[in-house]
Amino acid sequence: MTVRKWVWLLAALLPLGAAAQGKPVDSVLVTAEHSSLDKGLASWSEYSAHWLHDWGGHRVLDTALTRTSRFGLEDTQASLAYATPLMPRLAGSLEATASGSHHVLPKYSLGGALQYEFAPAWLLHGGLKHTRYDGADVERGTLRLEHYFGDFSASAAWSPVRSAGTSASGTEVRGSWFYRDGSSVGFILARGDEATVTAPGVVTLADVRSLALLGKHEFRPGLAFAWSLFRTRQGNFYTREGASVGVQAAF
């Protein structure tokens, strides 16, 4: 999962203004990300614009357009994500992406997930995602256990992945502190084999180790700032360090 996606998750899970009170609200989220790579590789950049419609009650629609620059090539990607309660303790989500250029980004991806609250403040998440690159298909699953206690949350996840006849897996832990309504700070620590783009048109499974610090601060109802700092080692291919910032405004 990219840092850009982590920022979106914060925006969706911590709604702005009226949505936090169960009332519909529209908002725009604009994010920018910059990464520096070692081994003489050029820096990466990414810019996204999201339109989010939040009906309240954890029902959210996110449409986005993303522009990236990686390995000296530029890609544009459109994405759509939708999350909604299905039953009092069960929620579901769907996501899809598509890129007409797909030099480095996937040609398309499709995914779905379920979230079940099996006990008060205890959540079980399960999901599947198919990603199509030029010349490679990646299948990825996720099984996550999450717990909320006081102003904090913690989770652990296991993710099996398969590509080009090879199977592997990864693990991840997360922690968050919700220090006030609409605001949080947290970390994500992950390790395991993931699909890695090592060059234009080349996708392989590599041992990835990553750490991210991220947060969201709501200045006032309807206006929030999101940020992240991250470091990712993509096997022996390269190490990527960077940051992202985002501003979300309701209207």
Image: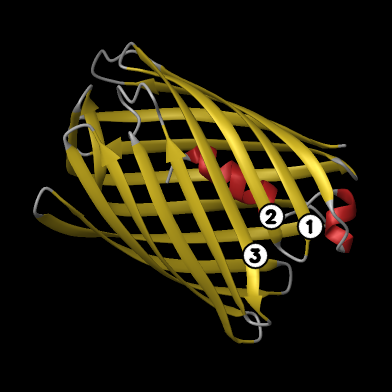
How many other residues sit within 10 Å of disc 1, few (<14), some (14-19) or many (≥20)?
Answer: some
Hey, which residue is sitting farthest bottom in the picture? 119
Q: Residue shown at 85%/54% (left/top)?
A: 24
Q: Which mark is residue 84?
A: 3
Which of 22/219 is in front?
22
Q: Residue 149, located in which quarter of the rendered image?
A: bottom right
* Callout 1 secondary element: strand
Callout 3, which amino acid?
Thr
Q: Which residue is mark 2?
A: 60
Q: Earlier in the sequence, mark 1 or mark 2?
A: 1
Residue 212 x/y as whole percent: 49, 44
Q: Earlier in the sequence, mark 1 or mark 3?
A: 1
Apparent side of residue 138 relative to residue 56 in the rendered image (left or right): left
Hey, which residue is sitting farthest left in the picture? 165
The C terminus, quarter of image:
top right
Q: Are marks 3 and 2 in contact (CB under 8 Å)?
A: yes
Residue 30 x/y as whole percent: 67, 29
Q: Are marks 1 and 3 in contact (CB under 8 Å)?
A: no
Callout 2, which amino acid?
Val
Picture layout, residue 30 above or below residue 140: above
Does the rendering let one see residue 214? no
Apparent side of residue 103 relative to residue 221 in the rendered image (left or right): left
Q: Residue shown at 90%/45% (left/top)?
A: 221
Q: Which residue is mark 1?
A: 55
Q: Residue shown at 30%/30% (left/top)?
A: 239
Q: Are marks 1 and 2 in contact (CB under 8 Å)?
A: yes
Callout 1, which amino acid?
Trp
Q: CA distance from mark 1 to mark 3?
A: 9 Å
Does the rendering let one see residue 152? yes
Picture layout, residue 103 above or below residue 93: above
